[in-house]
Amino acid sequence: MAFQVTIPVRCDDIDANGHVRGPAYLAYADHARWSCVQAAGIDLAELAARRIGPVNLETTMRFHHELVPGGEVTVSCSFQWGAGKTSRVTQEFHVPDGTLVASVSSVSGLLDLDRRRLVSDPAAHWRELAARPELLGLAPKTG
């Protein structure tokens, strides 16, 4: 099962049409990804000490139903890893009755902050740093 976090819909997230504005969905998605990384036990200070940092390379949003004020939305995070320098995170936004209101798909990498290049095996870095790598879609550490 994917990691999930529930976020209240704030009144300042609403546009002139009475529904959640696009940038708020991106903020919800970012919040859910960072919450997932922290729940996995990643120490952000350790990332900085290693001179690596996550970067978002592409984001696609799809709106399925209106998200209106006065409630909350549950945002999931599901990571997919390949052999390359990037990973994909798929996120779904559901209201309490289960209705899918939006989905976000992002392509991310880990940036070497000194060389300004993506690291070649981001999954290995995340796995090494995570206490619960399964939350990031990674197999647990062995040995």
Image (cartoon, rainbow, N blue to C red):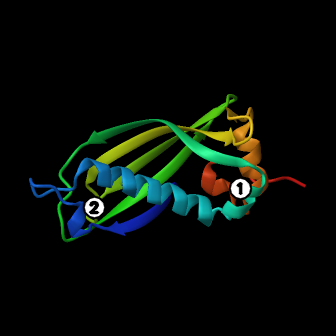
Q: Nearer the viewer, residue 29 or 3?
A: 29
| Residue 23 locus on image (x, y percent) | 30, 50
Element on which disc 1 rests: helix
Where is residue 31 shown, x and y percent of the image?
45, 60
Q: In terms of depth relative to the viewer, which is nearer, 6 or 14? A: 14
Q: Which residue is mark 2?
A: 95
Q: Is residue 98 visible?
A: yes
What residue do we see at 70% from left, 40% from top?
Answer: 122
Q: Residue at x 78, y 52 (%)?
A: 50
Q: Earlier in the sequence, mark 2 or mark 1?
A: 1
Q: Are marks 2 and 1 in contact (CB under 8 Å)?
A: no
Q: Residue at x 70, y 29 (%)?
A: 83
Helix, strand or loop at mark 2: loop
Residue 132 x/y as whole percent:
69, 61
Is residue 96 found left or right of 33 in the rendered image? left
Q: Quadrant of the C terminus?
A: bottom right
19 relative to 24 in the view: left or right:
left
Q: Looking at the picture, does residue 105 appear above or below residue 70?
A: above
The CA span between labels 2 and 1 is 35 Å
Label number found at residue 87: none
Task: Determine the image quadrant of residue 86.
Answer: top right
Q: Residue furthest front?
A: 114
Can the viewer see residue 43?
Answer: no
Name which residue lies at 19% across and 60% down.
14
- Name the kind of residue labelled 1 in the image: Ala
Q: Which residue is mark 1?
A: 48
| Residue 109: image location, x then y, percent | 61, 38
- Give the amino acid type for the residue marked by disc 2 in the picture: Val
Work out which residue is located at the far top of the displayed protein and give it: 84
Mark 2 or mark 1: which is in front? 1
Circle 2 packing at 10 Å, graded few (<14), some (14-19), many (20+), is some
